[in-house]
Amino acid sequence: MQIISSCTILLMTIVDILCKEKTSWTLNFTPAEITAVPGLCALVSCTFTYPDKSNSTDTIMWKKCDEKVQCSNDTFTFENVKKIKNNEQDIKSERLKMLEPDMSKQNCSFILSDIKADDEGEYKFKAGHQNKLSRKVKLIIQDKPVMEVPPLREGEQANLSCSAPSPCPETPPHITWWIKKRDGEITDVNNVTTSTTSEGLNSTLTFIPTSELHNATVGCDVSYGNKRNISANKNIKVMVSERNPIMKVITPIWQIKTCMETSDEEAPL
């Protein structure tokens, strides 16, 4: 009896665990932080799962939350996935577009256009009118590229880097470099490599600094089609390499005179 009772309890425990897994909701953001540029759009990639179709929802909401983890009323609400209700300005609802209107496909991704400074913050996803899927995604606003300039030494190759976010699929970034000398002359910049990541575009400028570039200005310009341009620049310092001084041996005049006199005495008649 004890054996049967133990087996029954074990079986019930396993079934309970499986049922909980089956009835659980999951939510994933890729990535969990998005860096956006003012004036452009931002893509928030979001997927979710629910236990079965009977628990699916036709209503989803996005709530914006502040640093105190206090969330506003429904910032964006989609009912029946066909019309948008918004508790704020009507024009704001036009800024948000769901990529997949059919929620049964478990895609909660959206694009927010015409990014503004006050859009920065965390957004919480809710399905239905119950407190489900409360994880958040963070939106960060960046209005210029990130430049990194290492210490420069004359004659030694250096790599300068510039990275720009790529939050909007319709306007990928394009990076260009320039170097302006102290006299205002713009030097040619050719040795540049670029790479694309999930977060944006990275560009590396490789060159050999010279003393002529001391106190010059290096710049990184980023264009997003004809929608937006952002840029960053820095003044560069070039450390001059130490050189071994050239030693000139100068013979004193009195030694030269002595040598000439000795030479005349020993010369044959």
Image (cartoon, rainbow, N blue to C red):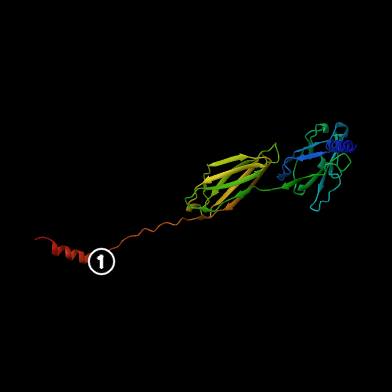
Specify the amino acid type for callout 1: Ile
The image quarter containing residue 112 is: top right
Q: Tag 1, which secondary structure?
A: helix
Residue with the mark numbered 1 = 253
Question: How busy is the neighbourhood of tag 1: few (under 14 within 10 Å), some, or many (20 plus)?
Answer: few
Res. 264 visible in picture: yes
Residue drawn at the location 73% of the way across and 47% of the way down:
140
Q: Is residue 218 above or below residue 26?
A: below
Q: Give residue 102's position: percent from left, percent from top.
A: 82, 32
Q: Give residue 256's position: percent from left, percent from top.
A: 23, 64
Q: Residue furthest bottom?
A: 254
Res. 182 visible in picture: no
Residue 62 appears left or right of 185: right
How many marks do you count on the picture?
1
Query: Which part of the image, by quadrant, shows the C terminus?
Result: bottom left
In this rendered view, identify the residue nearer to me: 60 or 229. Answer: 60
